[in-house]
Amino acid sequence: MYNNKKITVVLPAYNAAKTLTKTIVDLPSLVDDIILVDDGSNDDTSAIARRLNLFVFNHDQNKGYGANQKTCYQLALDRGADIIVMIHPDYQYDPRLIKYLVAFIADNYFDVMLGTRIRSRREALAGGMPLYKYLANRFLTIIENLVSGQNLSEWHTGMRAYKREVLEKIKWQANSDDFVFDSQILFQVVAQGFRIGDIPVPVRYFKEASSINFVQSCKYGWQTLKVAIHYLCQRRYFQR
């Protein structure tokens, strides 16, 4: 609880058994509710989550990263969350920084907060981010900022926090079930005039951390560009 707000962390999980416990241990004490949605994992992700006393929901099959987030957000809203923090349970993002994301929203500075891995090129690459991913991230973020009028340092982070009113107003249910969900929801946030802030988070790429491959990255990049063009041409659609 922070500033009389119920803080809920949602974990869109797929084969996160090796990193889940480390993620949960580092969550700050202000978190009131933890929801894990297992998107058809073939390891012990759900069993470990239950041992950690998390609220667990299982998809009967792998539905996709976007579909996983949709279930996460609906469950969080149904369980009375005031601030919803999404973080990947692969320990690529430092959970201890959640308290700062929450504070900026609870103290009414922003409606959405992002944890950005891009503070400098040296730090991003030293943290293990592949060069092609760094370059693609920079290119797509520049395009998205130009199209949207924002000045965010990264649009593609897996660490985000939302005020309840944001998820109640925008139509994220109609978004893609794939990775491009992340870009779609931010353009919706911009279209509705919500305030977005960001803070730097350490870059941690390692063997157990989830990461889409080169082919998936290319597909995601192309889909993201299409969303940006769609937003530029049909901003009123995103407002609806």
Image (cartoon, rainbow, N blue to C red):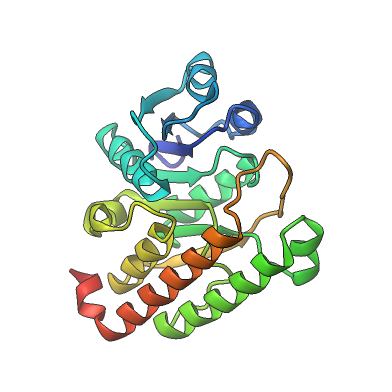
Check the image and report above or below for 207 versus 186.
Answer: above
Residue 201 placement: quadrant: bottom right
The quarter of the picture where the C terminus appears is bottom left
Task: Give the x, y percent position of residue 105.
Answer: 44, 54
Residue 239: x percent and y percent?
22, 71
Image quadrant in which you'd find residue 180: bottom left
In the picture shown, does residue 73 fall above or below 226? above
Q: Position of residue 67 (x, y in %)?
A: 34, 46
Relative to 208, 40 lies left or right: left
Residue sticking out furthest to the front: 215
Percent x, y of residue 194: 34, 67
Given residues 63 and 93, the one toward you in this image is 63
Q: Which residue is situated farthest in the left direction here? A: 240
The N terminus - image quarter: top left
Q: Nearer the viewer, residue 108 or 140?
A: 140
Residue at position x 61%, y 72% from top?
136
